[in-house]
Amino acid sequence: MVARLKKTRKSRGHVSMGYGRVGKHRKHSGGRGNAGGQHHHRTLFDKFHPGYFGKVGMRTFNYNKQVNHTSSVNVDKLWSIVGEEVRAKYTASAGDDKAAGPVIDVSRAGYLKVLGKGLLPAQPLIVKARYFAKAADEKIKEAGGVCVLSA
């Protein structure tokens, strides 16, 4: 800012320049930053920042956030696990009455849960997994398939 626009220009001729005679205008009279939160600035901290000081809850050492993580695959990706040639093979043998669909073991592909996003072609298949979402279960059965729970 230019010197002529500063407050100092207006304050010339006034002894304390607007900062009072008794408590003079010094550098950091209350301390720097959050200093004095539990001492001379206690009222401010209690009023505007309640609960700022202290502890809450329990400390958990060696806490693993991924403990409940379940790797999942959607219904629309099931056929990509076994490949297109397997699907073509089972499509060709669809005329047979006893022809069952391929067994897709989701856990061998590294997934634990089957979720229900996407469309599944109307072709029977047997899906093995540890967990099935309700929507996935319905879509697989709708396509003429079977859901097999495995440990």
Image: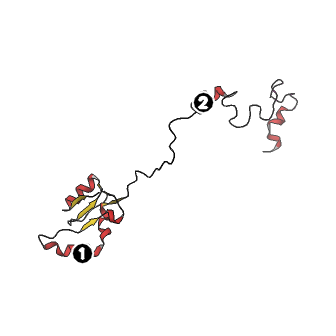
Q: Position of residue 18 (x, y in %)?
A: 80, 28
Q: Is residue 89 above or below residue 142?
A: below
Rendered image quadrant of residue 21? top right
Is 123 positioned to the left or the right of 108 in the image?
left
Quarter of the figure that contains the C terminus: bottom left
Residue picked out by circle 2: 48
Q: Is 50 placed left or right of 118 in the picture?
A: right
The residues tagged by marks 2 and 1 sit, at their Cα atoms, a distance apart of 68 Å
Q: Quadrant of the N terminus?
A: top right
Q: Which residue is located at x 80 percent, y 39 percent?
A: 6
Residue 130 spot, x, y in % from top left? 30, 56
Relative height, residue 35 to residue 126 (above, below) = above
Q: Secondary structure at mark 1?
A: helix
* Image-quadrant location for residue 132: bottom left
Q: Which residue type carries mark 1?
A: Ala
Q: Is residue 100 left or right of residue 116?
A: left
Residue that badge 1 annotates: 88
> Few, some or many C-alpha atoms within 10 Å of disc 1 (few <14, some 14-19, many ≥20)?
few
User: Which residue is located at x 30 percent, y 72 percent?
Assistant: 83
Q: Magenta segment range?
A: 12-29
Please name whichever residue, 53 or 87, is drawn nearer the observer in this view of the structure. 53
The one nearer the camera, 63 or 117, is: 63
| Closer to the camera in the image, 40 or 19 | 40
**Sequence-wise first label, 2 or 1:** 2
Q: Nearer the viewer, residue 105 or 50?
A: 105
Q: Amino acid at mark 2?
A: Phe
